[in-house]
Amino acid sequence: MNWRDIFATRMNQMKASEIRELLKLLDQPGIISFAGGIPDPALFPTDAFQDAMTEALSPGSAALALQYSVSEGYAPLRDWIIAEMGKLGIPCTRDNILITSGSQQALDYLGKLMLSPRDTALVCWPTYMGALGAFNAYEPHFDRLTPGGNRSAEDYAQRAAENGGRVKFAYASVDFANPTGETLDLAAREEVLSLADSLDIAVIEDAAYQALRYDGEPVPPMLALEIARKGSIEACRTLYCGSFSKTLAPGLRVGWVCGASQVVSQLVLIKQAADLHSASLNQMAINHVARSIFETHTAKLRDTYKARRDAMLTALETHMPDGVSWTRPDGGMFIWLTLPRGMDGGALLRSALARQRVAFVPGQAFFADRSNANTLRLSFSLANDTQIDAGIARLADAIRAG
Amino acid sequence: MNWRDIFATRMNQMKASEIRELLKLLDQPGIISFAGGIPDPALFPTDAFQDAMTEALSPGSAALALQYSVSEGYAPLRDWIIAEMGKLGIPCTRDNILITSGSQQALDYLGKLMLSPRDTALVCWPTYMGALGAFNAYEPHFDRLTPGGNRSAEDYAQRAAENGGRVKFAYASVDFANPTGETLDLAAREEVLSLADSLDIAVIEDAAYQALRYDGEPVPPMLALEIARKGSIEACRTLYCGSFSKTLAPGLRVGWVCGASQVVSQLVLIKQAADLHSASLNQMAINHVARSIFETHTAKLRDTYKARRDAMLTALETHMPDGVSWTRPDGGMFIWLTLPRGMDGGALLRSALARQRVAFVPGQAFFADRSNANTLRLSFSLANDTQIDAGIARLADAIRAG
């Protein structure tokens, strides 16, 4: 049987993730890894989840926790999210919230909602590779979103038409983005909104790291800025994607989309056809834990990760040779390194794994056009101070040797 | 903003489910409902899930349960499934199993894997409406699968070509199917496999109700029959979809696909891009509960549901007027009723809800071509004997009045 004849055309664009293949190499002893962008499991609020599960599976609640439920999501959790969105300047109601299985699923559903083959998605260069992967399933073209650049709306529209479709949305990870750690400032957010207005397209605002700010003043979400312009979420084109993966725990797979109800109702249809609903039990547990400890727990995360970021910035200052530059993020989990021109992050990884025993993610996979091979992503979320200093020293050795 | 211009073409085919809209009406007091095809929550193994959660969130395990995990699924759960598949005549390895968020997600991913717009999917008339919904997102045509009929492979291929694509797969719910309760017999299964061989297409075997047989001898899964023909799962075109929703609990959203490794590896790529992985904690809990009580618990379910099926068949014999016929399923949750020609199940539901206070699902939504309005689906999974007798008497009154 020739399965290639059976597979849909979209499968030509779906390839195994390099990060994923790479992570299989990290089980070897002695390697210091800055590769995985994942929370430190030592910080998970395990006791709170134990309490939450005991409550969810108690006699008055178990029948609900273990049964089918509605595609929109568990109403008390949506209510908690509504209150949080309100604090961010986003007044909304239950009709504006869909619970998803992590914000990755929100990106998949938004691609499914908007992209027909040959349509164009605007993304930053570099951007979250999971967004490129989710959108790729719907066979789009990617064009480069450059807040602060000076490409006109007409230019974007014309390029998209030449590719056989139209621009459907601009996607941006707004706070301490994966992979760069950088934040879109107020002017850049306003500019993306104005471009979206000119092109009459949607905006996907990925706010996965929003709660992990260590310095500086919060910048309002693009959805809040757009509501300030237009008066109501119902008039807005921005679709905000939130996640509990970086604040409470990724293993329960709970995230959300917040946007105009006429869009959320379409996403509900997509979810109903795709997996019926996110696990009832998990939504109840997240609701319980969020209501019990969200503020105190995220404060603890910020203290710990801030110290690790500071340790990594100090180690970079101490060890890196000339010609290497890096970002100085106000939050999140990532620092982005630019190597001297001509160096290749992939080749560096292979030699660094073999000789210096240090791991990171080569930057190329974060670019829709596979450019900028002389970049790499470092995560500081999992390592302690000693590992950070030793690992960055090893990385500097690898760069000097490369 | 005109969202219709932004939405993908697939959204033209995605409509709100009638069942779903209908279920919103069932909160009214005094209605006896045979509508929802869902397990009886009184039968959920709540204590076993409490034990499982306590273990999964214990100090040695919580870091795994709450963290990101691999897209393929939790290895010990895949091992349990491998042993179960072996008992059904399906020898396989971990590379043949993907854990999904319910078998609904398996259907979505299989549609995503194989269907480009204008391809053809073969389905029974009627079939599981959730399969029609999942596949619809990929803009196929549907053609009618008629085991025991005499349409040639050439006829199917030619019709598909006329519609601008090719036949990609045949989908069938094989045991006590939703909505008819009927089982594909051995000859019909062999015939579907032979048709698939002739057309060089895949077969999607939906086995969601497989463990709920109350009478008669089990029929081997199509995947087992194909392995018997071809020697190895790696040579097979059948993709078996299993679920824990009908045996342990739907609210955790755990199911699986079993098939050739070259197909499963592509489904892993799809899952990675779509939601990263199914909830780690849920997979660990299902694994614990399955290993503790699967056999004894499903035996208990069979005893209870068998008695309800018998009660409903008896009530139908007692109350139904001439001209009404129904299926006599060997298992599952459903009986399928055919009304006198010319009667409309949707109109009957509206009058039955208003006057006789009894609910069911009109049959039309289970037909890809929206034919056969004179049918309806009854579920016996949720009602006790008294409700069943009273509810069927009310339904008979409604039919006589209609």
Image (tube, coloured by chain):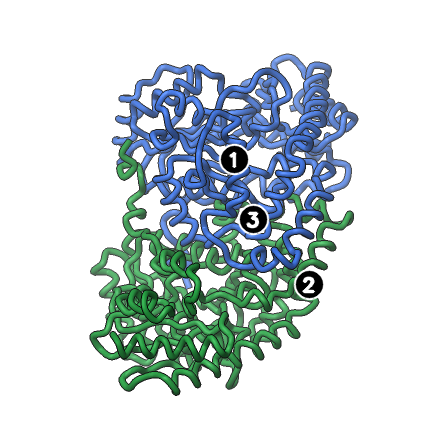
Chain colours: A green, B blue
Can I make out residue B352 in this image?
no
- B39 to A178, vertically: above or below: above
Pick the residue in front: B186 or B373: B186
**Above or below, comparing residue B216 to residue A186 in the picture:** above
The answer to which of B155 and B2 lies nearer the viewer is B155
**Element class at badge 1:** strand
In the image, what residue occupies the spot 74% across and 55% down?
A55
- Residue A137's spot in the image, x, y percent? 35, 52
Q: Position of residue A283 (x, y in %)?
A: 62, 55
Badge 3 marks a residue whose secondary structure is loop
Label 2 Cα neighbours within 10 Å, binned few <14 / some 14-19 / many ≥20: some
Residue behind mark 2: A48
Measured in 3D between alpha carbons, the distance from the residue under mark 1 to the one under mark 2, in whole angstroms, is 33 Å
Label 3: few (<14), some or many (≥20) within 10 Å?
A: many
Residue position marked by numbered label 3 in the rendering: A277
Which label's residue is closer to the chain start, 2 or 3? 2
For the N terminus of chain B, the quadrant is bottom left
The quadrant the C terminus of chain B occupies is top right
Do labels 1 and 2 touch, CB within 8 Å?
A: no
> Disc 3 residue type?
His
In whole angstroms, how far apart are the C-alphas of marks 2 and 3? Answer: 24 Å
Q: Amino acid at mark 1?
A: Gly
Question: Residue B397 appears in which quarter of the rendering?
Answer: top right
- What subunit carries mark 2? A
Q: Nearer the viewer, residue A95 or B146?
A: B146
Calculate the distance from the C-alpha at mark 1 to the C-alpha at mark 3. Answer: 17 Å
| Residue located at (69% from left, 40% from top) | B26
- Which residue is under mark 1? B242
Foreground mark, 1 or 3?
1
Observer able to see residue B54: yes
Q: Is residue A55 left or right of residue A245?
A: right
